[in-house]
Amino acid sequence: MVVDLDRCTGCQACVVACHAENNIALNLEDIVLQQRAMNWIRIERYWEGEYPNVKARFLPMFCQHCNNAPCEPVCPVYATYHNQEGLNVQVYNRCIGTRYCANNCPYHARFFNFWERDLEDTHREYLNPNVTVRTKGIMEKCTFCVQRIRKSEWERRQADEELQDGDVAPACVQACPTDTLVFGNLEDEDSRVAQLAKNKRHYRVMENLGTDTNVIYLKKVDPHASETAPAHAGTAASSGRNSA
Ligand code: SF4
Ligand code: SF4
């Protein structure tokens, strides 16, 4: 995945789409007040400057599908592992809820289910039948909408064809009105995502940790930036939040 921060307006369409696609529990007021809100993707907002010359910066954050994932080796039951496509996968049926993985994720991308879902009958009609409803006591996080990847693969297979660049659009990518999020196979040199990843604005969040993420960010272009501005203005590293 490539995230072009120069395009993000912080509209939160990706957040809403991810919730609807992946049957994520609603963040009701009492849940938010307990600081147990769950968002597989969130928009981090940073402020630069002093009032009245203030600028808002936005950074979509979700599981970075690290190639060297700190969440994987700490799981005692192998509920999280790396698959052959480079996805960081969570096996819900194996998870026993130790939360070691969440503690070891430097991106705060994992969430624990504190409650059993209390779904009214009418709410059940809104669920996506292609995605499991997780139960109390297990971890969950962004899957890169693996159900959509599998569906696209199956459709191509029926036509005896290979998966093409652009076939798979995770819900957040599909919903983004500004084309901030681009999904594809980084190992395919000709794919759009691989081409974008070569842009000179590219960087990985907290790459000093050696997590070797599969999400690449493109730095925001600021025509008014002074020469003394930090190199990654508007990112987690420059804001002081989540910095290593
Ligand atoms: S971002 Fe966190 S949850 Fe995702 S692979 Fe990396 S360490 Fe694991
Ligand atoms: S790729 Fe899918 S699961 Fe991940 S943040 Fe986007 S919509 Fe949510």
Image (spheres, rainbow, N blue to C red):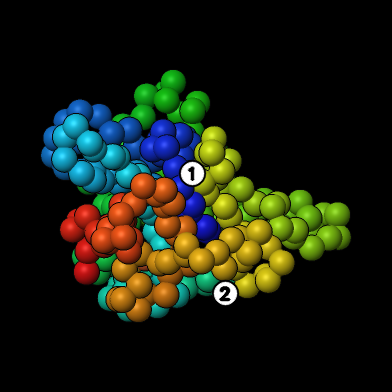
Decide: is 71 above or below 235.
Answer: below
The mark that comes first in sequence, 1 or 2, is: 1
Tell which residue pokes out farthest to the right in this image. Answer: 160
Q: From this viewpoint, is residue 98 visible?
A: no
Identify which residue is drawn at 61% across, 48% down. 169
Where residue 88 sits, quadrant-wise, is bottom left
Residue 240 can be seen in this image: yes
Query: Is the C terminus in the top left, top right, bottom left or bottom right quadrant?
Result: bottom left
Residue nearest the observer in this picture, 78 or 47:
47
**Residue 84 image label:** 2
Residue appearing at x 65%, y 51% in the figure = 168
**Depicted 238 relative to depicted 175: above or below:** below
Task: Where is residue 190? Give x, y as percent.
Answer: 71, 67
Amino acid type of disc 2?
Gln
Residue nearest the observer in this picture, 203 or 86: 203
Q: Position of residue 108 (x, y in %)?
A: 27, 57
Question: Residue 196 — which label?
Answer: none
- Identify residue for label 1: 7
Placement of 91 over or under 8, stated as above or below: below
Residue nearest the viewer, comparing 13 with 130: 13
Residue projecting furthest to the left: 34
The residue under label 1 is which amino acid type? Arg
Label 1: state its secondary structure: loop
| Percent position of residue 18, x then y | 46, 41
Which residue corresponds to the image point at 66% horizontal and 59% vertical from the top-left? 192
On the rendered structure, is 168 left or right of 154?
Answer: left
In the image, taking residue 190 as reference, residue 64 lies left or right, namely left
Viewer-closest of 52 and 59: 52
